[in-house]
Amino acid sequence: RILECTDSNHTHCCQIPSIKMQAPTGQAPQQQQIPMMQQAPFAPQQSQQMPMLQQAMLGQQQPWTMLQPPQAMLFPLQQQQQQPSAFNAGYASQFAPASQFAPSFGTMNPSMGIHQFEDDDPIEEAVGAMASAANPEPEPIVGTDGPISINTKVEYASLPKPAAGSGIVTQRVFGLVTVQAAQQEAEAPAERQPMDVVAILDVSGSMGGRKIQQVQEATRFLISQADPRDRLSIVTFNQAANRALKLSKMNPEGKDNANVAVLRLTAGGGTSIAAGLDMGLDIMEQRRQKNKVASILVLTDGQDASTHARLPSLISRAERAHCSIYAFGFGADHDARLLTELAEQARTPFSFVEDTEAKIREAFAGTVGGLLSVVAQDIKLTLKFHVQLEALHTPFVTDHVSDTERTVTIPDVFAGERRDLLIELAVPMESMQQCSDTLVLLEAAAQYKDLRSGGTVQSPSAPMQIEAVQEPQPEQEPDEDVCLQRERVQVKQALKEAMEQGNSGNFSSAQDILTEAEQQLRPVGKRSAASVALGQQLREAHSQIENRSQYESVGRAMMSDAMQMHSVQRCTNTNLSPAAQGSYMTPSQISHVSLSSMPPRF
């Protein structure tokens, strides 16, 4: 037998066999005993007396039963039920009984300690998908008709041969390897890939009041933009996590269910981001069928000291599940250090949402607009060096194949995006003397999954070469792209070093680093628009790290956001300067951000 609480204010009483656990509301709930249902261990139960959603949201006294997993038994949730708005209640009353939206923890596997879901909605054309999965992937085809092109450049097109007896052994050369994704064809919605998205939402006590409403609005915008082929799951967390919506197709019925789940969100309890990520990853890992684009969106406003140690294992699980993770810090009190660490390990942007009243939907929109335009995944960029490699500047995983070969893995690219690898090489002067015309410095080629064709493409090899000349070329101008990418790497590194000083309380040293970095940029008269934006970024950071109060309130988060944006060359945040956004945001992202800024039409 278990004890069932019949007080509607005690929506998080723990239902434990032979144990009474009462929520601290100061009221004495009625108790009644009911027989335990026969089902899998720790499966959630729902009372047959569940009221209609409108009654539940209006707070009427109706009983309900939920059996929580062991973690929740040890740490009972103590959320305070919030009174929903009249609008929410009126909207929710149109739909199904609340029993369909009771929180779900999934069946627990005691030996493995994970949630067992495996109830995701089937994707369209499941038969074809299973058939294609049964057949081996076709062999790579060399061609240029894929969405990715590989280009190489050197800072100076020519290099003078050394004079006899000069004593010069090597010459430092900066080169650039660019992975460029083709622009999305105008208005081709049928071409885009369906998505699997898990929204992991903080519902801790600090999210009460207007904050929870803003998260509801942002999530409902996400729902409104979904295609019937997309699937969405919603996970909420405080000190524990629960699944508010299974991975559901966003057809009309699925959208209705998702909106109801969102409208029922309430705030209370502590903060464990790891608990939310763990459950979100369980959902992704246990999908019976998979859309090609999959992502987890994490939104939190709280501090969490318990998650840092678990990040590496959580990120590894996301990589194996082939899903990206995007972090959104909500308001001035969120854990910017933790979310920055999460973004760095996930190799995605970190979005700081300072203006919580207007920008949450826009931040979600920037991310979703990008995910809707993914054109290639699992890009393996192979670099074969003909001269000595001094440094390879990239945030992405790099495998040291041999002394003369590296492989860089880029998880995905949006349509129109580029990834630039700045490379420092040491060119032997002996080789320059021996070559008659040009010297090949390296060769670059990429193999990747083309999402439109479903096949694997092998790009042609792109050589990086430099012309050998007898005399110096004093009028020779440096290549603009290489100069800009050198400055981008410098700015990113300066922001990182300044934050390290700020975290130690050395604010004057942090400002000195930023000032020196700006001085190292090209003279103002020779800067391009993108270079000007980088200088502006450094000046903004300088003002954000003047003192401890300024740095800890907004400075750390804003600088982390900018640093990670420049690192991965992707922007999802409209809080940053328009010039910075223009350097990275794609047309699809800009279009969705514009939609999000319009008045809600839910």
Image (cartoon, rainbow, N blue to C red):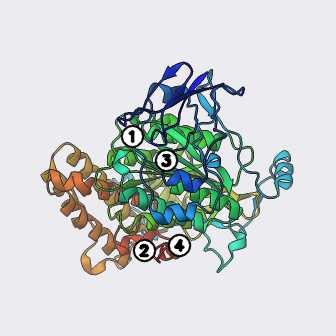
Above or below: residue 110 compared with residue 406: above
The numbered mark at residue 509 is none
Give the SS element for disc 3: helix
Q: Nearer the viewer, mark 1 or mark 4?
A: 1
Name the residue at 37% across, 63% down: 488
Whole-number angstrom distance, CA of label 1 to CA of label 3: 21 Å
Above or below: residue 226 compared with residue 399: below
The numbered mark at residue 346 is 3
Q: Nearer the viewer, mark 2 or mark 4?
A: 4
Give the SS element for disc 4: helix
Whole-number angstrom distance, CA of label 1 to CA of label 4: 30 Å
Q: Nearer the viewer, mark 2 or mark 1?
A: 1
Residue 457, image quadrant: bottom right
- Name the amino acid, label 4: His
Who comes first in sequence, dot 1 or dot 3? 1
Q: Position of residue 199 (x, y in %)?
A: 54, 52
Circle 4 is placed at which residue position?
592
Q: Residues within 10 Å of mark 3 (few under 14, many from 20)?
A: many
- Name the amino acid, label 1: Thr
Who comes first in sequence, dot 2 or dot 1? 1
Pointers 2 and 4 in contact (C-beta within 8 Å): no
Circle 1 is placed at which residue position?
271
Name the residue at 84% across, 51% down: 132
